[in-house]
Image (tube, grey):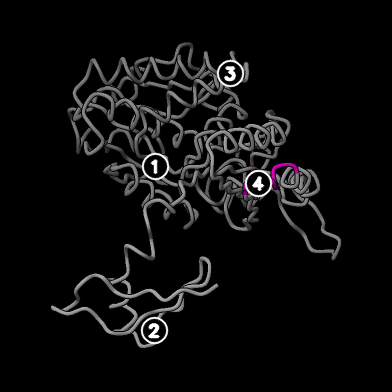
Amino acid sequence: MSQLLWGTQKFDGAISTFPVVRVANVVALPGVPKFCERAFDELQDQLFPVEERLSMYFDTIYTDLDEFDFSRKLTDLATKFEEKNVQIGSYPELKNKFFKTKLTIESESPESMEAVSTALRELLAGHIVYYDSYAWTDTVAKWAAFKKREKTENHLDFVKKLEEAERIVEEIVEKYPLEQIGLSFNGGKDCTVLLHLLRLKVDEKYGPSTPIQGFHIMVEDQFPEATQFIIDAAKFYNIQVLEFPGPLKVGLAGLLKQRPSIIPVLMGSRATDPNGKYMKTPVEWTDSDWPRVLRVCPILNWTYSDVWHMLRGLCVPYCKLYDQGYTSLGGRDNTVRHPALRVVLSDGKEHFLPAYKLHDDAEERHNRSNL
């Protein structure tokens, strides 16, 4: 049965003399834009009566699985909740480095929403991505949530490493003013972890708008992708990066010449690095024949897998070269894609898996000819 809706609200001082037609929940509005706008203004109480408005509940879940990996089970799940007015959407994502499928849930009741969300999370257990496209914002709350998830999933050894690194950075931030702290940042995965940790602790003490002091010691024939990532990360994380020629000893001398107040220098060195193996503790002064700085290496005892666990667990942006098969970055003259990540597709074309797919941590630097 159709119904004529007459305007009850004045528009430009008068009520229109034309109605619109409504059939069930479908309304035919005028095609002329100015009359359509007028109908919305005059009929808003009848078009959208308060008593007919439904509360809707929404949730979004991301997963690192391809849609085809769980499509049959997802169909069964959607059928199970069909009578409860729940809609489940599945959207494959081809370009995102953190997730492969985005799932949306719409429900008219919070109970149904909770039931479907729980069932989906059980279905995707071990493959849920807590995606965030702005990892550098609201860092304190996100860090707390990340550690809580890791504890819930019983990754207790990893949590200990997280907390140790966090404590070391916090002690430096508490002891030294920011103008005395320098972050070594070359765009690599390890110093990216450190950048996020420092941003976290600076946000916690000074607020998110506070800039960080950083420096980059350049390598010969540097990858342009690494250079671009340093530029992007500096913008996202509010870090001011100075550039100095290498090697490290020369670069540190240049840093102290331009910023003589620098005392602690945060570095992403790990014990498995060529130079990291000589460090006995995460915090040490440089040797007497080196520029005098306090070397701070919060992730000294982390593994290659630990680094990727944090970066991907928090969706921290990283240099895109790592998604192209590079596991360790040097210059273009001595760095290649890792041979263990090479696969040949069915059409005969060569393809390289991303760095986090490397299974043997000991092979991390097997793509570098100078190490």
Secondary element type, mark 2: loop
Q: Nearer the viewer, residue 239 or 220?
A: 239
Q: Mark 3 Cα within 10 Å, few/some/many (few <14, many 20+)?
A: few
What is the C-alpha distance between the residues marked 4 and 2?
Answer: 54 Å
* Residue, disc 1: 246
| Sequence-earlier tag: 4 or 1 | 1
Residue at 69 percent across and 28 percent down: it is: 362
Which circle, 2 or 1, is nearer the viewer? Answer: 2
Q: Residues within 10 Å of mark 2 (few under 14, many from 20)?
A: some
Q: CA distance from mark 3 to mark 4?
A: 27 Å
Q: Position of residue 146 (x, y in %)?
A: 49, 26
Give me the residue at 63% from left, 33% from top: 115
Q: Earlier in the sequence, mark 2 or mark 1?
A: 2
What label sits on residue 354 in the rendered view? 4
In the rendered structure, which disc, 3 or 4, sits on the residue that comes first in sequence? 3
Q: Are marks 2 and 1 in contact (CB under 8 Å)?
A: no
Q: Of the residues tagged 4 and 1, which is closer to the observer? A: 4
In the image, the segment drawn in magenta is 80-86
Question: Between marks 2 and 3, how big is the CA–CA gap?
Answer: 56 Å
- Residue 30 disc label: 2
Closer to the N terminus: mark 4 or mark 2? Answer: 2
Q: Horizontally, is 351 left or right of 129 in the view?
A: right
Foreground: disc 1 or disc 3:
3
Q: In front of the other: label 3 or label 4?
A: 3
